[in-house]
C-alpha cells in the first residue's frame, strides 16, 4: 500500500513540475492570457491539495 501511495505521490509531483514549466513557458512567449494562467494555477492548487493528502496518508501508514 505504501508503495502505491509513493507512486501516486511521485506522479503528482512530476505533474506539478510539468505544470509549473508550462506556466513559465506560457509567460515567456507572452501567450499568457488570464484564462490560461488561471486554469494552470487552479490545476497547480488542485495538485498541491492532492500531494498534501497523499503525504498525510503516507505518514499515517508509517506509524
Image (spheres, rainbow, N blue to C red):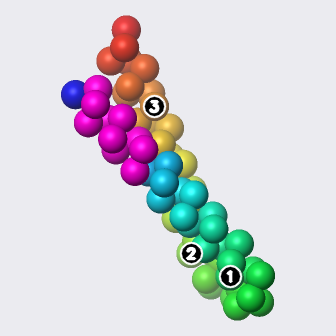
Give the extent of the magenta segment.
Answer: 2-11
The quarter of the displayed image where residue 54 is located: top left
Q: Which residue position holds label 2?
A: 39
Give the residue at x 70% y 91%.
Answer: 31
The answer to whether residue 46 is seen in the rendering is no
Most common secondary structure along the magenta stretch: helix
The residue most toward the top is 63
* Nearer the camera: disc 3 or disc 2: 3
Label 3 sits on a secondary structure element that is: helix
Q: Which mark is residue 26?
A: 1
User: Residue 46: where, in percent of width, then height?
Assistant: 50, 56
* Quarter of the image with the C terminus in it: top left
Q: Is residue 40 magenta?
A: no
Position of residue 36 relative to residue 1, above or below, is below
**44 shown above or below 32:** above
Mark 3, other Cα within 10 Å: few <14 / some 14–19 / many ≥20: some
Residue at figure coordinates x 63%, y 68% from the top left: 21
Quadrant of residue 38 within the rendered picture: bottom right
Horizontal and vertical percent position of residue 22: 61, 73
Mark 1 or 2, closer to the camera: 1
Frontmost residue, 44 versus 26 = 26
Query: In the displayed structure, does residue 48 sit left or right of residue 9?
Result: right
Q: Is residue 36 visible?
A: yes
Residue 27 quadrant = bottom right
Q: CA distance from mark 3 to mark 2?
A: 24 Å
As for residue 6 lying within the magenta part, the answer is: yes
Q: Which corner quadrant holds the N terminus? A: top left
Element carrying mark 1 = helix
Q: Which residue is mark 3?
A: 55
- 62 left or right, relative to 47: left
Amino acid at each position: 500500500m505504501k508503495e502505491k501511495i509513493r507512486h501516486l505521490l511521485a506522479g503528482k509531483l512530476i505533474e506539478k513540475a510539468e505544470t509549473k514549466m508550462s506556466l513559465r513557458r506560457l509567460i515567456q512567449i507572452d501567450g499568457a492570457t488570464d484564462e490560461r494562467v488561471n486554469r494552470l494555477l487552479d490545476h497547480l492548487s488542485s495538485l498541491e491539495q492532492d500531494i498534501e493528502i497523499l503525504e498525510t496518508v503516507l505518514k499515517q501508514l508509517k506509524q
